[in-house]
Amino acid sequence: MVIPIERHAFQIKDGVLSVLEAGAAGGKPVVLLHGVPTNANLFRSVLPILADVGYHAIAPDMPGYGETRLSDMADYSISAVADLIAAWIQAEKRQPIWLVGHDLGGAVAQLIAVRYPELVSRLTMGNCPIGDSFPVTAVNLAILAAKTGLFIPFTQLGLIPNFYMNGEIRRGFANPSHLTADMMKTVFWDGKVNEQRGRQEFAKHLKHLRNTESVEIVPQLAQVPMPTFVLWSDTDRHQPFEVIGQRLLRALPAGTPFDVVTNAGHFMPLEAPAVYSQKLLMRANE
């Protein structure tokens, strides 16, 4: 049986949160948070796998991405996003949830776990920053374009995305041939470059993107009370496990379990969704 993925919109304090959902509403809730520059479609092949074994799998478009829309005066920083996602979880009475964070979504997940531990039954993070390990160079260039007012004109002129940015996305795959044209369009660039409101949303996010709060909570990660698991890939050229993954493990409670998937790159949920899902579920069922 093919498990459908449905898109739903939720009214939130500053606008509308758009999410992809799969599985029965009464299933065990798992919320998956994407990073930059993806959207909820990062998990489009993962959601049905989790739903098939009884989970209600939910992937929001983070503010600044996809179909989520906030007010003009909203704060798009990861700190504010963490508070927004936590408020939505509380309002929808979904807690406690299994929280999964990838890339920048992992930094948001860290903030939620520290600030709202009562909402999180289990925490999984991978291929994600810790402290000041973000933004990476390509993102810093996009931030500069946004802060100087050039991001939207550059997208209108076709200067964003460019050869360098697309190359950095390809570097996020262990095997670049696994990156399809559809992925590049629907996961990475749709909305951000070819639709005016989407350009504005992403530019706002870039202007607000900073690592201040991520740095501040590093000492508190050692006290997170929920079962925690770190899942990485062996060919992450943006946040390498040998440096960033190990740094995260040192910050978490001693003995935090981890696994490293071979032959997968930074965007593992896209490149190896079956293995990624299998690793998630193996640890969740222990």
Image: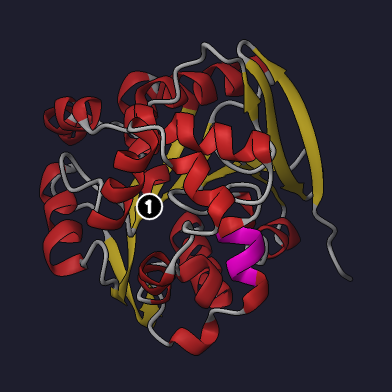
Q: Which residue is found at the position 55% from the left and 67% from the top? A: 277
Mark 1 surroundings within 10 Å by alpha-carbon count, few (fewer than 14), some (14 through 19), many (20 or more)? many
Q: Which residue is mark 1?
A: 103
Q: Which residue is found at the position 20% from the left and 59% from the top? A: 245
Q: Amino acid at mark 1?
A: Asp
Q: Is residue 187 magenta?
A: yes
User: In x, y percent, where is residue 99?
Assistant: 48, 41
Quarter in which the C terminus is drawn: bottom left
- Magenta-colored span: 183-188
Q: Is residue 185 above or below residue 234?
A: above
Q: Which residue is found at the position 64% from the left and 65% from the top? A: 185
User: In x, y percent, where is residue 192?
Assistant: 58, 47
Residue 234 horizontal side relative to residue 54, left or right: left
Looking at the rendered structure, the number of numbered marks drawn on it comes to 1
Residue 177 horizontal side relative to residue 228, left or right: right
Q: Which residue is found at the position 65% from the left and 48% from the top? A: 191
Q: Is residue 60 above or below residue 126?
A: above
Quarter in which the N terminus is drawn: bottom right
